[in-house]
Image: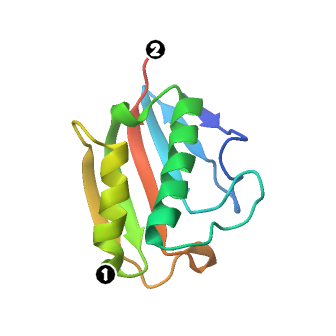
Amino acid sequence: MRKIISTEQAPKAIGPYSQAVVSNGIAYLSGQIPNDPVTGQLVEGDIAAQTERVLQNLKAVLEACGASMESVLKVSVFLKDMADFPKMNEVYGRYFASNPPARSTVQAARLPRDVSVEIDAIASVSG
């Protein structure tokens, strides 16, 4: 059994996928990009500003799933340029300050809408 998750607090899916799917107490979140859910526009600014927006989007989807940043088990970070890793990591560290999840970080040749960062996650869901 699986439950499809959608929230107005995060950007709408821009393709045939769900913001998240919950199955057997685990939330599988689609990748989030630095898209403002209110304006529908990409956030301007450096990698730190973009990462901040991505993690806010991720947090909103987690909450819609009944999960939280603290319940995240695994994160995948996709960067346009690995030189952005230190700034991305600094912002990321504020969201996962204690008991951080497992993580992979890779450089991608190209991301949706030519953004600099995309992050997805897997989390446990309470209840």
Label 1 sits on what residue type?
Answer: Ala
Q: Give the residue displayed 34% in from the left and 68% down from the top.
A: 87
Judged by depth in the image, the label closer to the viewer, 2 or 1, is 1
Q: Is mark 1 on a helix, strand or loop?
A: helix
Q: Where is residue 115 in the image (x, y as percent from the top left)?
A: 55, 75
Q: Give the residue displayed 31% in from the left and 81% down from the top.
A: 83
Label 2 sits on what residue type?
Answer: Gly
Q: From the viewer's perspective, is residue 40 above or below residue 28?
A: below
Q: From the viewer's perspective, is residue 59 above or below residue 91?
A: above
Q: From the viewer's perspective, is residue 95 above or below residue 23?
A: below
Q: Residue 83 carries which label?
A: 1
Q: Is mark 2 on a helix, strand or loop?
A: loop
Local crowd size for mark 2, using a 10 Å CA cut-off: few (<14), some (14–19), many (≥20): few
Q: Which mark is residue 98?
A: none
Q: Alpha carbon of mark 2 to alpha carbon of mark 1: how far?
A: 40 Å
Q: Where is residue 1 in the image (x, y as percent from the top left)?
A: 54, 28
Residue, disc 2: 127
State if disc 1 and disc 2 touch (CB < 8 Å).
no
Q: Give the residue displayed 26% in from the left and 43% down from the top.
A: 101
Q: Position of residue 22 (x, y in %)?
A: 51, 33
Q: From the viewer's perspective, is residue 42 above or below residue 71?
A: below
Residue sitting nearer the eye, 76 or 84: 84
In the rendered picture of this protein, how many numbered marks are placed on residues? Answer: 2
Residue sitting nearer the eye, 5 or 71: 71
